[in-house]
């Protein structure tokens, strides 16, 4: 009798969880280093956001009234409490602008400025942190010392509410000229798919180029390696950065550059979803 009651309760809980999931709520995971964090100061036009675009807060931010693991209208910052405008901002804005009104878009952004892709390697991140510069450690601590683990934790929360449709990456400056970068990204991507029970063909990886040579990008040579990513990951798509304006350091995009870059991520994703 007890076993039957247990089975009935389990089935009820499963049905309730499935019922609460909104298949018209498209979720996208975002990770990387400082350009995905967002390095540009938001301008007045960036404060107006369609509430159909949501962010799942990945860290507690009492100064802006946000709690980890809760959804909010996606007004910047979308990463940590004091980060700036990023490609994720205008990715989401463009998505809700172009998608049918019944569809909402949510992003989760777990990024760490200056980090190598090794920080998101679930098997080796601890050894990477041991060699990380001191200024990076406080950012890593905001994710309880495990950014990859935080991304998965937040993604599992999001899966109760919607459906993960894609993964956005912007990383590479700190791995410039690393010919093993594509294989390292492949390991992280495949780990995310496995840990979240996702299929590659329905959850593509969108990887953006670093600041382009046409803007004087100091890490522009990395784009040659990023361009080869689809050879290692068939479901990867490279987002070009040519013409996206940058800041004085020639390392980070400026606000206008992030807006254009985010739109390009969205245009690729919309095509993959079957929308013109």
Image: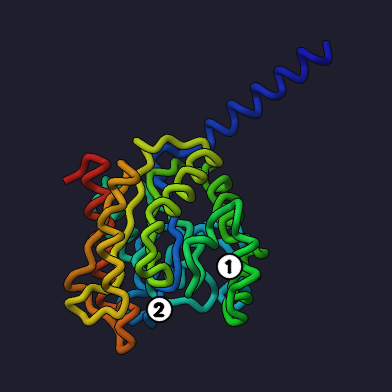
- Check the image and name the residue furthest to the bottom: 248
Q: Residue at x 40, y 78 (%)?
A: 39
Res 119 visible = yes
Q: Which mark is residue 39?
A: 2
Q: Is residue 67 visible?
A: no
The answer to whether residue 205 is left or right of residue 16 is left
Element type at mark 1: loop
* Rendered image quadrant of residue 225: bottom left
Q: Quadrant of residue 131?
A: bottom right
Mark count: 2
71 and 141: which is toward the camera: 141
Quarter of the image where the N terminus is located: top right
Q: Secondary structure at mark 2?
A: loop
In this rendering, the answer to whether 156 lies above or below 119 is above
Q: Is residue 113 above or below residue 51?
A: below
**Camera-nearest residue between 142 and 249:** 249
Q: Earlier in the sequence, mark 1 or mark 2?
A: 2
Q: Position of residue 258 (x, y in %)?
A: 30, 72
The residue at the point 33 percent across, 46 percent down is 232
Q: Is residue 29 left or right of residue 220?
A: right
Q: Residues within 10 Å of mark 1 (few under 14, many from 20)?
A: some
Gap in angstroms between the C-alphas marked 1 and 2: 20 Å
> What is the residue that sits farthest to the top in this orientation?
1
- On the image, the x and y values in percent for residue 122 come to 58, 52
* 7 or 209, nearer to the observer: 209
Residue beneath the point at 62% across and 68% down: 129
Q: Relative to residue 240, is residue 235 depicted above or below? A: above
Residue 38 coordinates in the image, percent (x, y): 41, 73
Which label number is shown at residue 58?
A: none
Q: Which residue is mark 1?
A: 66
Q: Look at discs 1 and 2 and give the one toward the viewer.
A: 2
């Amino acid at each position: 009798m007890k076993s039957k009651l247990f089975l009935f309760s389990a089935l009820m809980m499963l049905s309730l969880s499935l019922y609460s999931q909104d298949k018209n709520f498209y979720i996208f995971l975002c990770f990387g280093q400082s350009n995905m964090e967002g390095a540009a100061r938001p301008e007045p036009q960036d404060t107006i956001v369609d509430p159909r675009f949501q962010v799942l807060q990945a860290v507690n931010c009492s100064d802006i009234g946000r709690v980890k693991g809760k959804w909010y209208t996606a007004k910047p910052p979308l990463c940590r409490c004091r980060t700036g405008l990023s490609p994720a901002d205008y990715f989401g804005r463009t998505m809700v602008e172009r998608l049918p009104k019944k569809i909402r878009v949510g992003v989760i952004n777990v990024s760490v400025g200056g980090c190598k892709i090794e920080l998101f390697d679930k098997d080796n991140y601890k050894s990477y942190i041991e060699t990380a510069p001191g200024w990076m450690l406080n950012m890593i601590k905001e994710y309880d010392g495990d950014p990859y683990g935080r991304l998965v934790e937040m993604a599992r929360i999001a899966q109760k509410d919607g459906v993960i449709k894609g993964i956005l990456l912007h990383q590479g400056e700190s791995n410039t000229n690393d010919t093993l970068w594509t294989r390292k990204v492949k390991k992280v991507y495949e780990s995310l798919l496995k840990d979240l029970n996702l299929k590659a063909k329905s959850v593509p990886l969108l990887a953006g180029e670093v600041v382009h040579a046409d803007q004087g990008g100091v890490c522009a040579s990395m784009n040659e390696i990023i361009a080869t990513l689809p050879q290692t990951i068939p479901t990867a798509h490279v987002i070009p950065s040519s013409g996206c304006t940058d800041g004085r350091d020639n390392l980070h995009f400026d606000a206008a550059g992030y807006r254009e870059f985010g739109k390009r991520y969205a245009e690729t994703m919309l095509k993959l979803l079957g929308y013109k």
